[in-house]
Image (cartoon, rainbow, N blue to C red):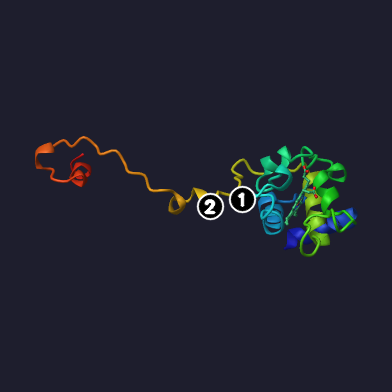
């Protein structure tokens, strides 16, 4: 919470805050995007071919190209869309607009170079969970002691 206040201070009155208070992608940025955008820009849906569930996806962008320009929030499509005054094209299109704090953090993150950790991963696809997988009949291994196996299951025990 303190860092968010410092970042807000840094943007509202740069003189009053230390300029090197970096915005932390994992702590400050990903939670905002997860809550407000992954439903339409994540693993299950990619509206306008855009995913926002990892730093790499944000840089890759969607139909209109990269969603951000690292170091240049003012000319970043993502910022244009979340600050759009037209309700019909502002993102997210549903619910309340992002708060001033959320917009400030996103702008600061992009202006600071839009860094994200190397181990940043996109959402896992829930459809990949084994529970959603059609069970496949495995090949029966060649049993070492074929003499005493009475049932294909025995082959797995004796393999
Ligand atoms: C923080 C939240 C969000 C951000 C930053 C965001 C950002 C964007 C951006 C940058 C584009 C243009 C992508 C391109 O064409 O290359 C876009 C398009 C789109 N987004 Fe989002 N989005 C957010 C949330 C949502 C949500 C929650 C929905 C669905 C309810 C949604 C639905 C769409 C649709 C349908 C388009 C394509 C039509 C259009 O460009 O208006 N977005 N979004």
In this view, the residue farthest toward the left is: 147
Tell me what residue is drawn at x 71 percent, y 42 percent. Answer: 49
Left or right side of 12 for 106: left
> Do we see residue 7 in this rendering?
no
Rendering coords of residue 115 (x, y %) = 71, 43
Q: Which residue is mark 1?
A: 44
Tell me what residue is drawn at x 78 percent, y 54 percent. Answer: 105
Residue toward you, 28 or 96: 96
> Do we see residue 146 in this rendering?
yes
Which image quarter is the C terminus in?
A: top left
Rendering coords of residue 116 (x, y %) = 68, 44
Residue toward you, 55 or 12: 55
Mark 1 crowd level (few <14, some 14–19, many ≥20, 10 Å Cα) = some
Tell me what residue is drawn at x 42 percent, y 48 percent. Answer: 134
Rendering coords of residue 96 (x, y %) = 79, 64
Q: Which mark is residue 126?
A: 2
Label 2 sits on a secondary structure element that is helix
In the rendered image of this protein, does residue 9 appear above or below residue 53? below
Residue 85 in which image quadrant: bottom right
Q: Is mark 1 within 8 Å of ligand 1?
A: no
Residue 16 in which image quadrant: bottom right
């Amino acid at each position: 919470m303190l860092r968010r206040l410092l970042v807000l201070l840094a943007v509202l009155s740069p003189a009053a805050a230390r300029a090197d208070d970096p915005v932390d992608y994992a702590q400050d940025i990903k939670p905002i995007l997860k809550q407000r955008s992954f439903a339409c820009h994540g693993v299950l849906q990619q509206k306008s071919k855009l995913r926002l569930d990892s730093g790499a996806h944000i840089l890759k962008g969607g139909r209109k190209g990269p969603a951000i320009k690292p170091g240049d929030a003012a000319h970043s499509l993502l910022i244009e869309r979340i600050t759009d005054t037209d309700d019909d094209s502002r993102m997210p299109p549903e619910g309340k607009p992002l708060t001033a704090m959320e917009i400030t953090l996103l702008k600061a993150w992009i202006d600071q170079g839009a860094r994200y950790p190397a181990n940043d991963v996109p959402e896992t696809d829930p459809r990949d969970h084994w529970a959603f997988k059609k069970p496949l009949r495995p090949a029966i291994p060649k049993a070492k002691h074929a003499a005493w196996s009475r049932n294909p299951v025995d082959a797995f025990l004796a393999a």
